Amino acid sequence: MSKLPPLRTTPPYDPTAKMVTVINRLMVGSLNSVGSVTLTDNGTTTVLSDNHVSRGCKLFLFPTTAHAAAVTGLWADPTSVPADGGSIRLTHSAAAQADLNFDYLIVR
């Protein structure tokens, strides 16, 4: 297997360098379609806003706290994604804890 060239981390970023950096990061699994969301405490819906959300995307949620792992009925409503994307509604059971934290991954 060939070794990837090191990523450029200092300016100047010319267009070719930017493209090469993006491709290199994709090749090593570094994506910018990840994030964190905290569910609304005592509520049953939470809106996740992310520019990578679009109709037909796949959303994977990973609990990062014990209280988040205990949440039941969590699902992403695909019909709530606007035509131009950018957000999705998460439906979940009501829980009184404030640390209902999840990491997420969006795949188009």
Image: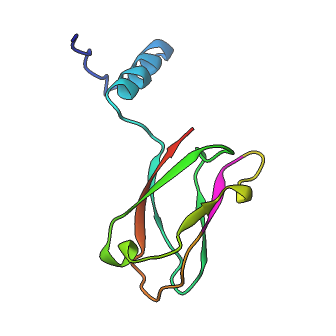
Residue 12 visible here: no
* Magenta-colored segment: predominant secondary structure: strand
Check the picture and name the quadrant holding the C terminus.
top right
Residue 101 percent location from the top left of the image: 40, 69
- At which x and y percent is residue 49? 60, 57
Q: Position of residue 80 (x, y in %)?
A: 72, 59
Question: Is residue 10 or residue 44 the one in the foreground?
Answer: 44
Q: Residue at x 54, y 80 (%)?
A: 93
Count of numbered badges drawn on the protein: 0
**Could you tell me which residue is drawn at 48 percent across and 85 percent down?**
95
Where does the N terminus fall, quadrant-wise? top left
Magenta-colored stretch includes residue 23: no
Looking at the rendering, the stretch of residues picked out in magenta corresponds to 85-90
Question: Quadrant of the rendered structure where residue 78 is?
Answer: bottom right
Query: Going by the image, does 30 lie left or right of 96?
Result: left
Answer whether residue 35 is visible to the viewer in this image: yes
Residue 67, image x and y in percent?
36, 79
Task: Check the image and report above or below for 77 versus 84.
Answer: below
10 vs 102, nearest the viewer: 102
Q: Residue furthest front?
A: 73
- Residue 68 higher or lower than 16, as above or below: below
Q: Which residue is drawn at 41% across and 16% down?
A: 20
Q: Does the magenta stretch include residue 89?
A: yes
The front one of 51 and 42 is: 42
74 vs 34, left or right, is: right
Colour basis: rainbow
* As drawn, 19 above or below 108: above
Drawn side of residue 2 relative to residue 105, left or right: left
